[in-house]
Image: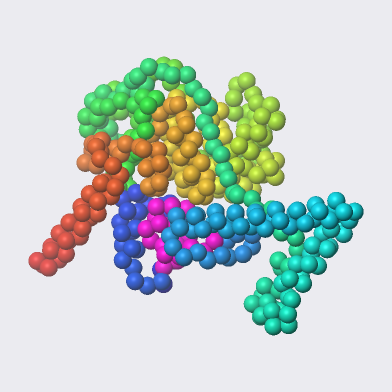
Amino acid sequence: MFVLFPHALARVDLNAVIWLDDYLQKWKKTLLIVSHDQDFLNTTCEEILHLNNMKLDTYKGNYDSFKQLEVKKREQATKAWDQEQKRIKALKASGSTKGQADAKVLSKKVKESTGTKKKRNDAIASGADSAEAKTLLARPREYQVQLAFSEVQNLQPPIIQVVDVGFTYGPHLPSIFDSLSFGVDMQSRICVVGNNGSGKSTLINLLIGELNPTSGEIRRNPKLRVGIYNQHFQDKLPMDSTPTEFLRNCTEEGLDYQSARNLLGRFGLEGHAHEIAMRDLSGGQKARVSFCELTLTRPHVLFLDEPTNNLDIESIDALCEAINAYQGGMVVVTHDARLIEATESQLWVVEDRQVIKWGEEFSNYREYLLKKLEAQMEAMHGNKGAK
């Protein structure tokens, strides 16, 4: 049995995820995956277990099939809830109090569910006797998250211009980049890919000014504002502050209490979490607070380093939609194929001290990478055989 948890994918680069995806598609034994990567679930899973309302529902098929079936199931549940509410409303209109109407509907449900002795015994044996018939239906609610980045004034390109840049971390250390030249503007949708250690984070740090080039020059528009979200965002959050307090102090002009709470709500943070210390929030909740801070800076270009690590699937969908509606540029490092494809990002491959613009679609990059890995494996086996 092979068990894969979300943090396992969070620690590997896109190339490793593509290899693992291909490997697990050929896995013949039991495979259990807990993941928020939709593409990964679609290609590797044949059955989905959905934990919802303290129940575990089983769906045959991949993740896309599950979503279609879940929508139908929710529509059926909504129809049943509407019918039950109509019965209660009719009873109240005929003179019953709310309590009496509820009791009559519940009584009818119990009779319908256990009408005959055989039916009652079957219900008891299956465990279906107790819960649904003894309570009114809860209104089905779809879990939705909405993210939105602030509107920004357009800046004329190039916003960031990289001119013949080289970089090394020390005079006696190997060169990371040689002679890089390219530009980034407010129409850019760039995904930086490459093996771990190839220089992806170094490239981001050069672009945002955290690092200075060893040679060459990086020119930035003097009016440029950048928004930065990286894997270590939690280290910058004040653990003693509440999300509301933190956001109110994020800008020079300040943010009023209700506006801070409204922003947190729009980014999917539950109301009860607005007023508790940051240290008591989950990783996903802290990520939402960081995205709120990001939009308050009104950036012209977003730099996102593995932004999906602490987000659930619905939040990743919302992030894709927010990026597509965003008027500024984006440079992202991610192992999530859905984020790359949904935002129509151009791949920039970091390897051999260069940044190479991939001119084809993501699916072609996947095929190229798998063939490259296969050739490397064959070469390794060939060398072992020669020895």
* Front residue of 247 and 19: 19
Q: Residue at x 58, y 65 (%)?
A: 56
Is residue 37 inside the magenta stretch? yes
* Front residue of 33 and 212: 33
Q: Indicate left or right for 42 with 291 as reference.
A: left
* Front residue of 382 and 93: 93
* Front residue of 377 and 52: 52
Task: Please give the range of residues in magenta.
Answer: 31-50
Which quadrant of the figure contains the C terminus?
bottom left
Does residue 6 show up?
A: no
Tally of numbered discs: 0
Q: Quadrant of residue 77?
A: bottom right
Q: Quadrant of residue 75?
A: bottom right
Q: Residue at x 34, y 68 (%)?
A: 27
- Colour scheme used in the picture? rainbow
Is residue 34 inside the magenta stretch? yes
Does residue 86 show up?
A: yes
- Residue 227 position within the rendered picture, expressed as x and y whole percent measured from the top left: 47, 30
Q: Residue at x 33, y 58 (%)?
A: 20
- Residue 84 position within the rendered picture, expressed as x and y whole percent measured from the top left: 73, 57
Q: Indicate left or right for 72 with 358 as reference.
A: right
Which quadrant of the figure contains the N terminus?
bottom left
Instruction: Spot the residue most to the left.
Output: 386
- Residue 281 position within the rendered picture, expressed as x and y whole percent measured from the top left: 62, 47
- Residue 29 position within the rendered picture, expressed as x and y whole percent measured from the top left: 37, 72
Q: Residue at x 38, y 17 (%)?
A: 156
